[in-house]
Image (spheres, rainbow, N blue to C red):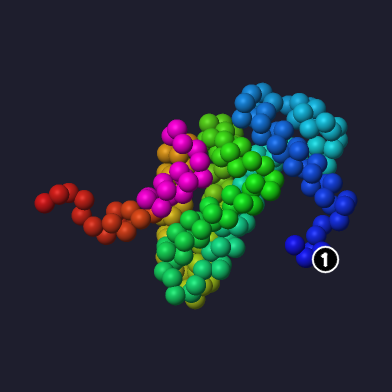
Amino acid sequence: MDTASRPGLRERKKQRTRDALLRAALELFTTGGYEATTVDEIAEAADVSQRTFFRYFAGKEDVVFFVQSLAESHFVDAVRARPSHEAPLEALRQAVLQGWDGIGRAVEEIIPTELHLRTYRLIESTPALFATHLRRSAELEEEIAHIIAEREGLDVDADPRPRVAVAVFGGVMRVTERLWCAGQDISVAAIRELTARHLDAVGPALAERWRAG
């Protein structure tokens, strides 16, 4: 890394404190339950005060979705960077599949990838978190629909195709997340393979007859 772009000592200390809070909170949430874990327990596990916790996070929900927000930002950037000649669904497919390759590295700088993946299961199994996840997904889909419309030279409010394409894509992602969370293998490779297989089924599912003969 270029010396000029490296964070200063104060900033690195703040990042270490933030990351320690994230690891402590997510370990407590995934082992003892989200609702049962208190902010005081998180602060104690990270060896900081409750006041310090609230300097970094507004509450427990912010902790749960912090790394997911990072992953979503990587995905948005990946969609924007896809070549203009790609069809919209292919651009989304390539962005998410390549994203899993890069997101693992970015996440590992903050928390173990295995802990991040366990957090997905926590979200799926906790009604309050799952409701927040659905709302955030809807907001992300709207952002992506605008990006797709812009790259295709369309008015997102006049032409339904960007929102339809993103809705199909988002539905596939929710199916793969649910199947992955219910499975035995919670590795990045497993969710990447599930995602690829289900996205590859979109075309045949929409355009072809299913019944043999």
Amino acid under disc 1: Ala
- Residue 189 in magenta? yes
Q: Relative to 25, is 101 on the left or the right? A: left
Give the answer, above or below, for where 158 lies relative to 206.
below
The image quadrant that residue 200 belongs to is bottom left
Specify the segment rendered in magenta: 183-198
Residue 47 at x, y percent in the picture: 83, 31
- Residue 68 in magenta? no
Report the residue at 58% width, 38% height from top.
Answer: 114
Report the residue at 46% width, 49% height from top.
Answer: 192
Seen from the viewer's position, the closer of residues 76 and 44 is 44
Residue 82 at x, y percent in the picture: 51, 68
Report the residue at 66% width, 23% height from top.
Answer: 36
Residue 70 at x, y percent in the picture: 64, 52
The image quadrant that residue 160 belongs to is bottom left
Give the answer, above or below, for where 188 lies relative to 183.
below
Residue farthest toward the left in the current orientation of the protein: 213
Q: Quadrant of the N terminus?
A: bottom right
**Residue where numbered disc 1 is placed:** 4
